[in-house]
Every structure is written in structure tokens, then in C-alpha cells.
Amino acid sequence: MKPKKQKSQSTPKPENDVSTNLDKLRAKLDASLKESQQSSERQEALSAPQMPPQVILRARQLEKKGKFTKPIVKRTPLDMRWDSAELECGHPIRIFGSSEEASNTCRECTEAWLLRQARKAKR
């Protein structure tokens, strides 16, 4: 008697792979679009005509005093010119690879402060 060939049930159909890959790609695109929209909304909120002048002036004073300057806790080279750095607050930044500064101004913390103060000023 000839042995029977067993059907392999573990190999997925190519159609399923394509639909799974499309679902993953769709999810990535949706996340990217949402992030882009949030960034756009944030930039609109930070635009000068909507921001009260007293809030901008106070932010400048605090920036000069170093309130938004955070120490660099981690630094990773990206290429010959740029490094990725993580600030003490947890926000990532890009800096020149030749930079020897131990701290940097955190733009995200500055923007968050500006938005909070602008909301308070509008009340």
C-alpha cells in the first residue's frame, strides 16, 4: 500500500497574507493620518494671531531663564551628521552629531506650556 499524503493545514492561503498585510498597512496609515492631523491642529493653536501677546512674552522670559532647558539623558547616532537624543522629560529631539551640549530646549514642553497658558488667558 502507498502511504497517503497528508494535507498541510499550516500553510496560509496567499489571499489571507495579502489581506492581513493590507490591514496592517491601513492601520499604519490611519495612525499616521491621525498624528498629522493632531500636529496640524497643534500648529494652528500655536500660531501668533491666536496666542495672547502676554503669554508669548512670558514664555520668552522663562526660556531665557532656562525653564524649558532639559538635560540630555540618552544619545544615539543616526548618521554622520545627526544624533537622536532623549531629554530628561522623555521627549525625543534631533541634534547635530558634533554638538557637545549636555542639555537642550524641549520644544514639546514649551509648546505644551504655551497651550495651557493660552487656554487660561482665554477664560
Image (cartoon, grey):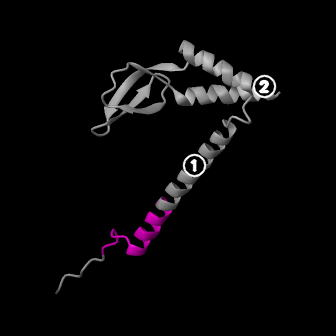
In screen coordinates, is 84 left or right of 117?
left
**Residue tagged by mark 1?**
36
Quadrant showing the C terminus: top right
Drawn side of residue 44 relative to residue 33, left or right: right
Give the image location of residue 99, x and y in percent: 34, 25
Q: Quadrant of residue 82?
A: top left
Q: Is residue 114 magenta?
A: no
As helix, strand or loop, the secondary structure at mark 1 comes to helix
- Looking at this view, name the residue that lies furthest to the top: 65
Total marks shown come to 2
Percent across and percent down for residue 117 are: 71, 25
Residue 79, percent across and down?
29, 40
Q: Residue at position x 52%, y 57% from top?
A: 29
**Magenta part mainly helix, strand or loop?**
helix
Cα–Cα span, label 1 and label 2: 27 Å
Identify residue type, mark 2. Ala
- Give the extent of the magenta segment: 8-24
- Decide which of 43, 88 is in the foreground and name it: 43
Q: Is residue 23 magenta?
A: yes
Please tell me which residue is depicted at 64% across the width and 25% down the height of the picture: 113
In what element is the residue under mark 2?
helix
Q: Which of the numbered marks, if any, corresponds to residue 121? A: 2
- The vertical placement of 85 against 101, above or below, is below
